[in-house]
Amino acid sequence: MASITVLYFAAARERAGTQRETLEVSGGMRVQEVLRLLAERHPTLGPLLPHLRVAVNQEFVDPSAEVPVGAELALIPPVSGGSGLFSVVDRPLRLEDVVAAVSGEAYGGLVTFSGSVRNQTKGRRVLRLEYEAYPPMAEKRLAAIGAEVAERFHGTRLAIMHRVGTLMPGELAVVIAAAAPHRKEAFLACEHAIERLKQDVPIWKKEFFEDGEVWVGLGP
């Protein structure tokens, strides 16, 4: 027998009742077999497992993948949401920080995006949001988006900063800047970055209302 480290985030952490634990496994065990063990250990986690992605040593893997001895396996719930700056921070964001990271005389087009907390969702008043992340993997995935952007949009430079912790309506959750020699590539790169961030970066948000709370992406 050998051991692996299991990390839980957002709704998975709540269901398991822990953020991290050590699991004894057999050599050559597959991801899907590890998930069965976890469902037996934490029965309330079982219904959530079909909605999760799994990362082994900070890389997404298929259920049939082998889990190496000593690996770090992370359960990743659905997310809410090259050069330059890619970081996850627990402090207020400033748009000028990402602008400064990509600006340069060779870049004539600069497009920015600021995502702030709304005060309502589907008619329900939002009291606050809580953002949670798997920081090392999140920053690695943000950097990968930057590399995608540079290749796809002719050397466009990208910077992304995302905040975690408790945010009130009106506060910035994410800031993005894309700089390119021409405006078209800058616009396209910024839009691409926003969509990819929502798809693939392990950052989650929980909305708190007057009459309840919900992890975004998992429903009520």
Image (tube, grey):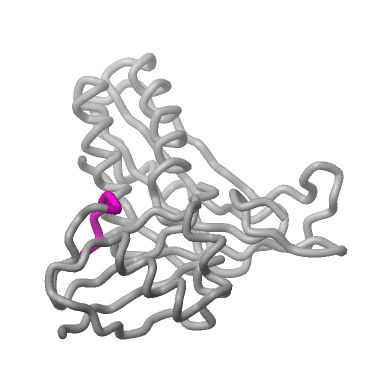
Horizontally, is 79 left or right of 53 in the view?
right
Horizontally, is 85 left or right of 116 in the view?
left
Q: Residue at x 31, y 21 (%)?
A: 108
User: Can you say which quadrant of the picture contains the N terminus?
Assistant: bottom left
Residue 118, percent across and down? 72, 48
Q: Residue at x 23, y 62 (%)?
A: 30
Which segment did they paint magenta? 56-63
- Residue 19: quadrant of the picture: bottom left
Q: Residue at x 48, y 53 (%)?
A: 50
Horizontally, is 99 left or right of 82 in the view?
right
Residue 64, percent across and down? 24, 52
Residue 164, percent across and down? 51, 64
Q: Is residue 145 above or below residue 218?
A: above
Q: Residue at x 25, y 84 (%)?
A: 24
Between 15 and 78, the one lying in front of the other is 15
User: Can you say which quadrant of the picture contains the C terminus?
Assistant: bottom right
Between 50 and 145, the one lying in front of the other is 50
Between 38 and 205, the one lying in front of the other is 38
Q: Is residue 83 above or below residue 214?
A: above
Residue 66, percent across and down? 17, 60
Q: Is residue 81 above or below residue 27?
A: above
Q: Is residue 19 magenta?
A: no
